[in-house]
Image (tube, rainbow, N blue to C red):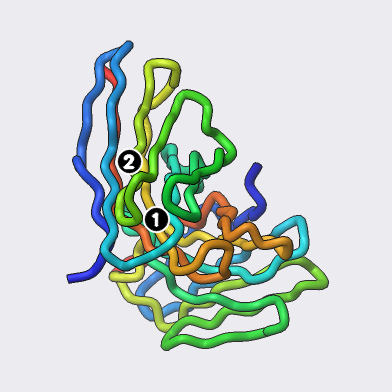
Amino acid sequence: DGGITQSPKYLFRKEGQNVTLSCEQNLNHDAMYWYRQDPGQGLRLIYYSQIVNDFQKGDIAEGYSVSREKKESFPLTVTSAQKNPTAFYLCASNNVAGATDTQYFGPGTRLTVL
Amino acid sequence: SQQGEEDPQALSIQEGENATMNCSYKTSINNLQWYRQNSGRGLVHLILIRSNEREKHSGRLRVTLDTSKKSSSLLITASRAADTASYFCATVFASNTGKLIFGQGTTLQVKP
């Protein structure tokens, strides 16, 4: 059953904590992306990776970090430096780096700061 | 910064009616895509139209693209209650980094 999975579905963080959101895909896609969505808003790009061991900042990278050690995995860490982390986080992937292919999205993780 | 601006922000119609959503963008694009998002879920790709295309159909969906006006529209014909969702346009720049730039979306409610 191919697809892109995110875990956990819901995540609660205390102020000052770092948390890591998981994103895994078995679609053999080269590129992976992390987006943030706030209520009633579109998606904003946090980080993206077009190849293993390489990634680039998106529009709102401050307070976030990523790694891409394996092709199928692209975890996102929300650090304590991110002052307003409560949001819905979406991971996506697509077929070829830099191509115009559509992106395939995971189901999302809703992060809430307590 | 967000490339696409969508209009209207919210739309409420009766089942069976047509729904039209519009998207405008600012710079030259390689292609424009439409996605659907059910509440609290991930996005699902609906249709892609390339910059050299003017119209595209997929089932009850019709997408048009006017590159001279830098705008696109998504028409859903004979709407159903199950079409209730948010719809987003996303553009890929002509310079093509592979990144999508999303609009803020149109929330569609279809009343049974």
Neighbours of disc 1 within 10 Å: few (<14), some (14-19), many (20+): many
Neighbours of disc 2 within 10 Å: few (<14), some (14-19), many (20+): some
Residue A87 visible at all: yes
List x then y, in percent, for residue B62: 54, 82
List x then y, in percent, for residue B17: 44, 78
In this figure, which residue is indicated by the disc labeled 1? A92
In this figure, which residue is indicated by the disc labeled 2? A75
Q: Amino acid at mark 1?
A: Ala
Q: Amino acid at mark 2?
A: Pro
Q: Is residue B16 above or below residue B19?
A: below
Determine the residue positioned at 35% across, 70% down.
Answer: B83
Front residue of B82 and B94? B94
Quarter where residue A56 is shown: top right
Same chain shared by disc 2 and disc 1: yes
Q: Chain of mark 2?
A: A
Q: Chain of mark 1?
A: A
List x then y, in percent, for residue A54: 49, 45
